[in-house]
C-alpha cells in the first residue's frame, strides 16, 4: 500500500494506492504529477493515475527496484 502525505502536517492525503502484495521498493512520479509508477517485491511494476488512484497497468518483472520516468513520462528505467 502506498500513502500520500502532506509535507507540512505529515498527515495522509486522499485514499491510498492499493494493489501491491509485498513491500514497495521504488516510486516515480511524473513531472506533471499525473502518473505514479511503483515497483514491489511482489515482482510487479504498476502504473497509477495519481489523482484518482486508479490502477492503469501492471507488469510482471523479476526483482524490480528503483524507478525513474523520463521527463515526458514515455520511458521508464
Image (tube, rainbow, N blue to C red):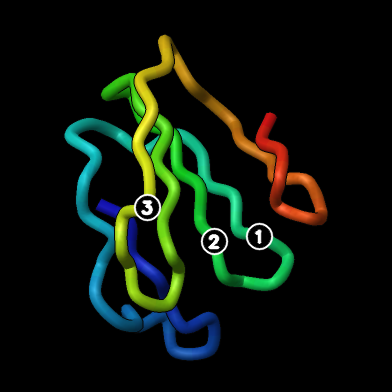
Quadrant hosting residue 68: top right
Q: Which residue is mark 2?
A: 35
Q: Position of residue 65 (x, y in %)?
A: 52, 25
Give the tally of numbered discs.
3
Q: Is residue 71 left or right of residue 55?
A: right
Q: Nearer the viewer, residue 47 or 41?
A: 47
Residue at the spot x=17%, y=34% of the render? 21
- Spatial CA distance of label 2 from label 1 is 5 Å
Q: CA distance from mark 3 to mark 2?
A: 9 Å
Residue 47, placed above or below residue 14? above
Question: SS class of the residue under badge 2?
Answer: strand
Tag 3 residue: 56
**Mark 3 vs 1, N-terminal side:** 1
Location of the C terminus by quadrant is: top right
- Circle 1 SS class: loop
Q: Are marks 2 and 1 in contact (CB under 8 Å)?
A: yes
Give the mark nearest the N terminus, 2 or 1.
1
Label 1 Cα crowd, 10 Å radius (few <14 / some 14-19 / many 20+): some
Q: Are marks 3 and 2 in contact (CB under 8 Å)?
A: yes
Foreground label between 3 and 1: 3
Measuring from the top left, give residue 34's x and y in whole percent.
56, 70
Q: Nearer the viewer, residue 2 or 47?
A: 47
Residues at marks 3 and 1, CA–CA distance in whole angstroms: 14 Å
> Who is closer to the viewer here, 63 or 51?
51
x and y, in percent, of residue 9 in the image: 44, 89
Which residue, as the protein is rendered here, is positioned at the far bottom? Answer: 9
Give the x, y percent position of residue 10.
42, 80
| Position of residue 28 in the picture relative to residue 24 (left or right) | right
Vertical relation: 21 (above or below) 43: below
Q: Which residue is mark 1?
A: 30
Amino acid at each position: 500500500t502506498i500513502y500520500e502525505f502532506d509535507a507540512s502536517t505529515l498527515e495522509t492525503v486522499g485514499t491510498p494506492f492499493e494493489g501491491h502484495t509485498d513491500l514497495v521498493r521504488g516510486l516515480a512520479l511524473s513531472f506533471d504529477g499525473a502518473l505514479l509508477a511503483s515497483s514491489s517485491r511482489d515482482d510487479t511494476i504498476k502504473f497509477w493515475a495519481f489523482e484518482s488512484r486508479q490502477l492503469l497497468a501492471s507488469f510482471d518483472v523479476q526483482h524490480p527496484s528503483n524507478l525513474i520516468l523520463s521527463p515526458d513520462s514515455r520511458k521508464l528505467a
